[in-house]
Amino acid sequence: MAKKILVIDDEMQIVEICSDYIKAAGFEVITASDGLTGLATVHREKPDLIVLDLMMPELDGLNFCRILRRENDTPIIMLTARVDETDKLIGLELGADDYITKPFSPRELVARIRVVLRRISTEPNNDTIRIGQVELDRSYYQLKLPDRIINLTPTEFEILATLMSQPGRIFSRSQLLIASQGVSFESYERAIDSHIRNLRRKLEPADYIVTVHGVGYKFEG
């Protein structure tokens, strides 16, 4: 069955172009023209991935992410016409898995969609990573602690899985970016900091992820 992609953007020309390329790549496409309609569509259609514009009427992309992440971990690729890096990092902190700056190549969007879906397309299995009282369940992209179970986005999961795979080893931002995205671009490396902040909030009050200034991050159980 084809993966279902939801495209949310108030610019109909962009929606049409994206839809044509995504359909040509073998995916099913559904669309929405504003954030509120997009939320309703998520609940009704349960898409496998969301392509989300940052600037929209009714409900913008940042608030869409904020609301959706309270209940749903569907992967999100954010589209933004803004050049301010702060906006991009806020989107990542709110749970977006990737972002593309407008104007963009529809072929690049399709490639990004494939990369994100590839990370979550493995068949459910019983593989777990366990360090002390911290356990990662690859079947459900969940972080299990003694007192609670926490859902992670695919990007958060891959970053934490990489860190936990070799406790005490220092991983650079570039290495974590490759592990979570499959590619590394220098301009994206600071996005790792946003995902690390999200992970730290979810792991509170424990501080398992240690910053090694000027080098990267490591996991200490």
Image: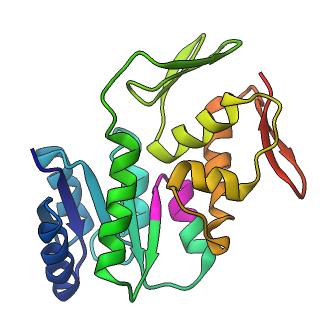
Q: Can you say which quadrant of the picture contains the N terminus?
A: top left
Q: Which residues are magenta?
A: 90-98
- 119 left or right, relative to 12: right
In the rendered image, residue 97 lying in the magenta stretch gets the answer: yes
Q: Which residue corresponds to the image point at 28% horizontal and 58% vertical from the top-left?
A: 50
Q: Can you say which quadrant of the picture contains the C terminus?
A: top right
Seen from the viewer's position, the closer of residues 89 and 37 is: 89
Indicate the colouring scheme.
rainbow
Q: Which residue corresponds to the image point at 34% horizontal and 84% vertical from the top-left?
A: 105
- 196 left or right, relative to 140: right
Q: Is residue 134 above or below residue 199?
A: above
- 155 left or right, relative to 65: right
Regarding residue 56, the answer to whether it shows in the image is no
Q: Is residue 97 above or below residue 43?
A: below
Percent position of residue 85, x then y: 62, 76
Seen from the viewer's position, the closer of residues 105 and 94 is: 105
Seen from the viewer's position, the closer of residues 179 and 98 is: 179
In which image quadrant can residue 53 be found? Answer: bottom left
Seen from the viewer's position, the closer of residues 52 and 100 is: 100
In the rendered image, residue 75 lying in the magenta stretch gets the answer: no
Percent position of residue 146, x then y: 60, 10
Percent position of residue 164, x then y: 68, 29
Regarding residue 153, the answer to whether it shows in the image is yes
Q: Is residue 149 above or below residue 208?
A: above
Q: Which residue corresponds to the image point at 67% horizontal and 48% vertical from the top-left?
A: 197
